[in-house]
Amino acid sequence: FGNNQIRKIDVDSPTPQNVRVAGTNRSRHYSAGVNNDALDAELRHPEAVWVDNAGTAFISDGGNNLIRKIVNGKISTIAGDVAAAQAKATTPGDLVGDSDGDGGQAIYAHLDKPRGVTGSAGKLYVAEEHGSRIRRINLNTGGIDTVAGDGTILEQRTNGGSLFIKGDPDGNALEAQF
């Protein structure tokens, strides 16, 4: 969270190594990197990483409201408002976001503090902290939709914490509140 880098521990080495995979510690908060080199890209509060069976890494670049992908050392954005991240590249703090764009292409959709990512069967699931929803990106078509949450920010966010999270007992995920 502090140095805006993604690292991995290479456990296959006889002496395990801490290896930087993406990001820098420069003062800019967004760039795609020179020639899309992941080691030269700037991230803003990357928080979650999911690696698929093929070795592709998906990163929640939470402060920029983006989902980034790394393949063979090259980084690209698969979801979020890149123009907003570029425009605010030198400003501190996280960007303001929203959850617009369901039903369209993920690269044109907006995200609101994506914090967690995981995937399965050609889908990437993104947990939005401020958006209070789970978004699904189809990795084959690039489409995005909401699969859980209604965007309501519950009291536990403003009262310092609560164990109560309202959900629909009948299982309607789009009406669930997180």
Image (tube, rainbow, N blue to C red):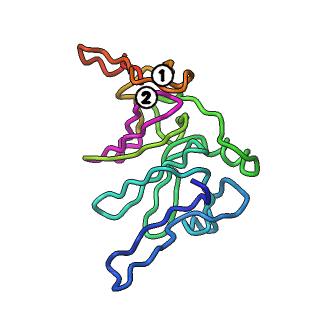
Where residue 125 sits: x, y (%)? Answer: 37, 40
Where residue 155 sits: x, y (%)? Answer: 51, 18
- State if disc 2 and disc 1 touch (CB < 8 Å): yes
Q: Residue furthest bottom?
A: 14
Q: Which disc number belongs to residue 133?
A: 2
* Vertical comparison of 132 with 53: above or below: above
Q: Which residues are the magenta region?
A: 121-142
Where residue 133 sits: x, y (%)? Answer: 43, 28
Q: Residues within 10 Å of mark 2 (few under 14, many from 20)?
A: many
SS type, badge 2: strand
- Residue at x-position 38% and y-position 54%: 50
- Residue at x-position 40% and y-position 32%: 134
- Read off the residue under disc 1: 151
Q: Estimate the spatial distance between the alpha carbons at disc 1 and disc 2, rounded to whole Å.
A: 6 Å
* Vertical comparison of 101 with 176: above or below: below
Q: Quick check: is 172 in the magenta stretch?
A: no
SS type, badge 1: loop
- Residue at x-position 41% and y-position 59%: 57
Q: Residue furthest right?
A: 90
- Residue at x-position 46% and y-position 32%: 104
* Vertical comparison of 141 with 133: above or below: below
Q: Amino acid at mark 1?
A: Gly
Q: Nearer the viewer, residue 12 or 60?
A: 12
Q: Amino acid at mark 2?
A: Arg
Q: Quick check: is 123 in the magenta stretch?
A: yes
